[in-house]
Amino acid sequence: MILVFGDSLSAGYGIDHSRDWVNLLAQRLERENFPHRVVNASISGETTAGGLSRLPAALDSHHPAIVILELGANDGLRGLPLLHLRANLGKLIELSKQSGARVLLVGMMLPPNYGSRYTEGFEEAYTQLAKKQRVARVPFLLEGVADKRQLMQADNVHPTAEAQPRLLDNVWPHLLPLLKK
């Protein structure tokens, strides 16, 4: 079983949930004869602190083989301290690994208006944690989407339904080795 644990980007905010990337992942797994079920425990607006409070119950309830951890964007958009982001993501990874799950950490980037020091530190947090914790990482979930206005909803934060296959394509090559272990 794969547990997708994220925020609005994985919860399918503003689109029909049958078209979100997590549902498309479940369809691809079935089509390609992988035995994994997918549970989407993503919540719009979730921060790493909120995720940390929910993860133990989700792990106990679902016993996932793989956790796709897609959190942190809301921490960054709120300008929360990077120290907290790193600590919370680190603990989320540790809890997932302690439960026996393999982890795929989904990276995020922020718009430049937060200043280079913050945005670079934000992005580095994912890279450093993946390396330190020895987990797989998607460099940027919105690669090839965030810079294309037609693939973003009116809020310019959330991808459209048309962008969802691209999100899955950004995740898939990093997930595939975990599926084959």
Image (cartoon, helix red, strand yellow):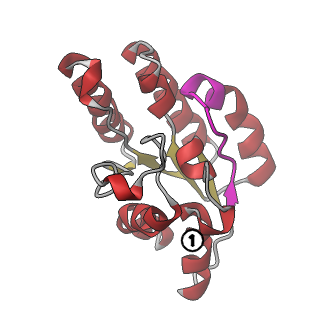
Check disc 1 and give the amino acid type: Leu
Residue at the spot 33% in from the left edge and 52% down from the top edge? 149
Would you place residue 35 above or below residue 106 in this image?
below
Q: Disc 1 marks which residue?
A: 24
Residue 62 appears left or right of 162: right
Residue 60 appears left or right of 42: right
Residue at the spot 39% in from the left edge and 58% down from the top edge? 151
Residue 27 appears left or right of 137: right
Total marks placed: 1
User: Where is residue 54 shown, x and y percent of the image?
Assistant: 72, 33
> For numbered disc 1, what is the local secondary structure?
helix
Question: Over which residues does the magenta segment extend?
Answer: 39-52
Q: Nearer the viewer, residue 32 or 27?
A: 27
Q: Nearer the viewer, residue 130 or 84?
A: 84
**Residue 101 showing in the rendered view:** no
**Residue 123 showing in the rendered view:** yes
